[in-house]
């Protein structure tokens, strides 16, 4: 099993840093899956325990100038590592003006991702700062636990309002309640609601637009038979929603949410070269 990669382009490096920052805000530990063409950051807390699920996908060619890996075996050319994303985020913070960053899987005393940051220096020799980030190697037999979650058969799919606006509303609402109701319909309307014994607050959004989904057999999801005006709703943990909105370091080109009534809210944030899916289960 071998992995080494190198980023020379400063814009790519800063973009990669922002993505890792976002992931560090969403997950204390996560799984890094490496394939020849992509990197995946995966968090699969058991939804039964009220946990969230995250699936973040990056095309390595958009970030790395060099990327070499050999997986566990020829027919399973992948590597699965468990790591604390905050450690990687901190290592990359030292690289903001770096000439190059090399990342390599090593195994001195324990398996580590070695991040070597080459900093510009005044003399001819360059300064290199290395960070060894401990990782766990996930055995082949557990890989199936980290498959991409399927898009749920949702009742409503809707584009999200500007995330900054949504973030400031949710931050204010967080002081009033531990949970928030998200409801939306197929006429581009979405409401964020707080209801407690003392107060009831609703923010309305209109004209957001509803994405068109076609399934494999050409039929739309069950959403198609719905009355356009009727609301699908789910009550979720407001801290988990706030965490997702606060973690956004990069403004997505597309952001949408799928609601399965009273069961789950599935967020999809798309950038040119990164896609992030985030599932928050509904509270009973």
Image (spheres, rainbow, N blue to C red):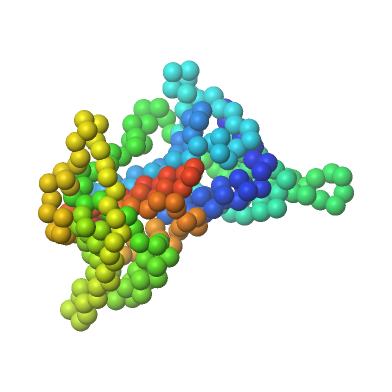
Residue 60 vs residue 90, the one in the foreground: 60
Q: Tell me residue 187's x, y (percent).
A: 21, 58
Q: Which of the image's four quarters has the N terminus? A: top right
Q: In this view, does 139 lie to the left or right of 205?
A: right
Does residue 117 appear anywhere in the picture? yes
At 21% from the left and 54% from the top, the residue drawn is: 186
Q: Which of the image's four quarters has the C terminus? A: bottom left
Residue 77 vs residue 107, the one in the foreground: 77
Q: Is residue 10 left or right of residue 256?
A: right
Q: Is residue 76 left or right of residue 237?
A: right
Residue 155 vs residue 142, the one in the foreground: 155
Q: Which residue lies furthest to the top in this view?
A: 74
At 40% from the left and 27% from the top, the residue drawn is: 140
Q: From the viewer's perspective, is residue 178 above or below residue 75?
A: below
Residue 181 location, quadrant: bottom left
At 39% from the left and 68% from the top, the residue drawn is: 165
Q: Residue furthest bottom?
A: 198
Q: Tell me residue 92's x, y (percent).
A: 61, 50
Q: Tell me residue 274's x, y (percent).
A: 47, 44
Residue 215 location, quadrant: top left
At 51% from the left and 40% from the top, the residue drawn is: 135
Residue 270 vs residue 64, the one in the foreground: 270
Does residue 110 appear anywhere in the picture? no
Image mark count: 0
């Amino acid at each position: 099993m071998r992995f080494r990669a190198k980023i020379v382009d400063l814009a790519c490096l800063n973009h990669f840093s922002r993505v890792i920052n976002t992931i560090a805000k969403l997950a204390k530990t996560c799984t890094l899956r490496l394939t020849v063409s992509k990197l995946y950051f995966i968090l699969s807390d058991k939804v039964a325990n009220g946990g969230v699920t995250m699936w973040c996908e990056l095309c390595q060619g958009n970030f790395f100038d060099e990327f070499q890996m050999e997986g566990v075996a020829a027919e399973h050319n992948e590597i699965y590592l468990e790591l604390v994303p905050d450690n990687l985020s901190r290592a990359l913070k030292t690289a903001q003006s770096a000439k190059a960053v090399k990342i390599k899987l090593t195994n001195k005393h324990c398996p580590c991702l070695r991040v070597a940051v080459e900093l510009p220096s005044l003399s001819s020799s360059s300064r290199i700062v290395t960070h060894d980030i401990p990782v766990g190697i996930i055995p082949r037999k557990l890989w199936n636990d980290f498959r991409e979650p399927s898009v749920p058969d949702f009742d409503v799919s809707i584009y999200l309002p500007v995330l900054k606006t949504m973030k400031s509303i949710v931050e204010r609402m967080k002081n009033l309640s531990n949970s928030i109701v998200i409801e939306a319909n197929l006429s581009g309307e979405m409401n964020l609601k707080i209801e407690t014994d003392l107060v009831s607050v609703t923010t309305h959004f209109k004209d957001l637009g509803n994405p068109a989904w076609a399934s494999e057999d050409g039929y739309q999801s069950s959403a198609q038979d719905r009355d356009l005006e009727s609301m699908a709703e789910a009550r979720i943990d407001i801290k988990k929603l706030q965490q997702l909105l606060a973690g956004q370091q990069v403004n997505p080109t597309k952001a949408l949410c799928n609601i399965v009534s009273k069961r789950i809210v599935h967020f999809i944030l798309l950038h040119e070269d990164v896609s992030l899916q985030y599932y928050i289960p509904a509270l009973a």
